[in-house]
């Protein structure tokens, strides 16, 4: 009994500390201020009391502050950060003086589960990884494999599953279905294997659960100054992260071993190419490199695309006129009845592409970006930054700024992305950050659009998707903008005239 009590003590102490901070916040907070800087503990109580609505709270603060605000953490922490969505600052950070704003050591420590992969790397390591990844993703063979595997996944597995669900008129979590789809699709592209998580019995996918736990824990590392103590004590979210990492490492290690046993052969998957590059390396070093590389690819492919699709269908449920215009476009090119769509045909879907961009503007899969500082300087917006200070770029807030997107910035209007000539309108990436910006622009952007457009075209042309009345939609506390309660829907087959 004594040992049981002792194990729970660290978590109890941390809980009491959190309660104390919240008490101080409620006792002394000036309700006319959005952000209060207390002695010693800084602005932490305000942050903790708003963490449940962190993205909207951050948006409110930026609106009130005029593009940027400085957050002061407790004196004993390294939580100070500049939050900004100033386009001039972002262009400077991501483009003009890119070299002064790396991810940095603190980013690598917070995101340690990603190892030395491309998301955590800077300098020469990042350049080499990006060059390799770009060569693989841009290769003709991979493009062919992408279209082939995506079509097979959509039309042979996903659509038949939705047809069965429509026949039963059951309530289903569309977010879960998209996460299963993108997990399978990403495993196919990265490892050359199909886990078949879209099977009718909905098998438990331990890797996916572990990835979700990891992203939630990493989010809390941005909001809790004592997360390193929690990691040392192995309690709370840090304990879940440790377990999650073991699950993900085991899954990836098995995939690498199976690929090696097949002599690295593949139909165009990325792992086969990476294994070829490690032939001359020490086995342990090679395994670590392959682990870190594939972990980064799995995060990029599974979570972001699933989140984007989920928010897109929620927005469609509230904007039926947009859905009708997408249907008209599919009919215009005789694509509503097709069992497979080519890359060329997907490229014709201008309005669908615009609608996806508009959804990504309002609900970017990665709502906050993180940058470090090498040398002190004054940003174009007038903010001074120094080494040791984090810069958080609020991409979620960016899509809600009237100064960037106009008075109608809160409206879902795909038309803002279409020119008078009916072509896609280009918007600078420093104001549309869903695929990052500058030298770190997302290499998988076209992969994501192929998958999203194929899924949306196939679903909309065959089904009505109705969000369950009264279902509460709100963001989950995670690095990725998932929905906290999923997206509960009923699916009904659409009659095609």
Image: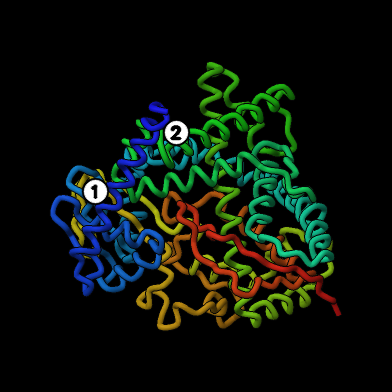
Residue located farthest toward the left when viewing the structure as drawn: 39
Q: Is residue 100 visible in this depiction of the protein?
A: no
Q: Residue at x 27, y 61 (%)?
A: 46
Please say if 224 is above or below 458.
Answer: above
Q: Is residue 277 left or right of residue 18?
A: right
Provide the residue designation for mark 2: 116
Q: Quadrant of residue 56?
A: bottom left
Say which quadrant the N terminus sits in: top left
Q: Position of residue 350 (x, y in %)?
A: 64, 72
Q: Quadrant of residue 161?
A: bottom right
Residue located farthest toward the front when viewing the structure as drawn: 1
Mark 1 or mark 2: whose residue is earlier in sequence:
2
Say which mark, if any, is on residue 195.
none
Q: Position of residue 167 (x, y in %)?
A: 84, 65
Q: Residue at x 50, y 69 (%)?
A: 426
Provide the residue designation for mark 1: 389
Please say if 11 is above or below 257.
Answer: below
Say which quadrant the C terminus sits in: bottom right
Q: Residue at x 79, y 69 (%)?
A: 462
Q: Position of residue 34 (x, y in %)?
A: 25, 69
Would you say the residues marked 1 and 2 are in contact, meaning their CB atoms lie under 8 Å apart? no
Disc 1 element: loop
Q: Is residue 288 visible in this depiction of the protein?
A: yes
Q: Is residue 44 left or right of residue 436?
A: left
């Amino acid at each position: 009994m004594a040992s049981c009590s002792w194990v729970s003590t660290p978590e109890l102490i941390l809980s009491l500390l959190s309660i104390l901070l919240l008490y101080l916040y409620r006792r002394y907070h000036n309700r006319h201020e959005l952000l209060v800087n207390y002695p010693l503990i800084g602005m932490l109580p305000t942050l903790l009391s708003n963490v449940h609505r962190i993205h909207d709270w951050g948006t409110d603060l930026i609106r009130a502050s005029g593009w940027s605000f400085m957050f002061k953490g407790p004196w004993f922490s390294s939580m100070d950060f500049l939050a900004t969505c100033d386009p001039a600052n972002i262009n400077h950070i991501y483009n003009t003086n890119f070299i002064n704003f790396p991810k940095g050591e603190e980013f690598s420590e917070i995101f340690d589960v990603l190892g030395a992969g491309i998301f955590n790397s800077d300098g020469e390591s990042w350049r080499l990884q990006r060059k390799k990844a770009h060569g693989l993703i841009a290769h003709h063979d991979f493009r062919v494999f992408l279209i082939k595997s995506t079509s097979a996944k959509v039309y042979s597995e996903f659509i038949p599953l939705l047809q069965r669900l429509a026949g039963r008129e059951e309530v289903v979590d569309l977010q879960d279905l998209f996460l299963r789809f993108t997990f399978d699709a990403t495993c196919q592209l990265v490892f050359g294997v199909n886990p078949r998580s879209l099977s009718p019995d909905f098998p438990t996918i331990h890797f996916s659960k572990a990835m979700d736990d990891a992203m939630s824990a990493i989010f809390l590392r941005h909001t809790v100054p004592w997360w390193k103590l929690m990691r040392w004590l192995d309690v709370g979210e840090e304990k879940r992260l440790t377990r999650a990492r073991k699950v993900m490492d085991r899954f990836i290690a098995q995939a690498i071993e199976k690929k090696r046993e097949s002599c690295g052969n593949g139909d165009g998957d990325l792992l086969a190419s990476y294994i070829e590059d490690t032939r001359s390396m020490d086995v342990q070093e090679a395994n670590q490199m392959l682990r870190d590389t594939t972990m980064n690819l799995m995060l990029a492919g599974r979570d972001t695309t699933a989140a984007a699709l989920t928010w897109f269908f929620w927005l469609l449920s509230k904007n039926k006129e947009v859905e009708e215009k997408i249907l008209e476009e599919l009919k215009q090119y005789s694509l509503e009845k097709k069992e497979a769509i080519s890359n060329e045909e997907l490229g014709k879907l201008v309005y669908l592409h615009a609608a996806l961009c508009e959804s990504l503007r309002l609900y970017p899969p990665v709502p906050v970006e993180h940058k470090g500082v090498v040398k002190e300087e004054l940003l174009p917006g007038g903010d001074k930054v120094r080494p040791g200070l984090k810069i958080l770029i609020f991409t979620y807030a960016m899509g809600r700024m009237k100064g960037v997107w106009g008075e109608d910035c809160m409206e879902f209007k795909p038309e803002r992305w279409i020119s008078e000539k009916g072509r896609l309108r280009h918007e600078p990436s420093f104001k549309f950050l869903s695929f990052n910006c500058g030298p770190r622009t997302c290499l998988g952007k076209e992969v994501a659009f192929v998958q999203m457009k194929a899924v949306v075209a196939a679903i909309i042309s065959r089904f009505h998707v109705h969000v369950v009345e009264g279902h509460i939609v709100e963001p989950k506390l995670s690095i990725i903008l998932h929905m906290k309660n999923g997206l509960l829907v009923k699916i009904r087959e659409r009659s095609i005239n």
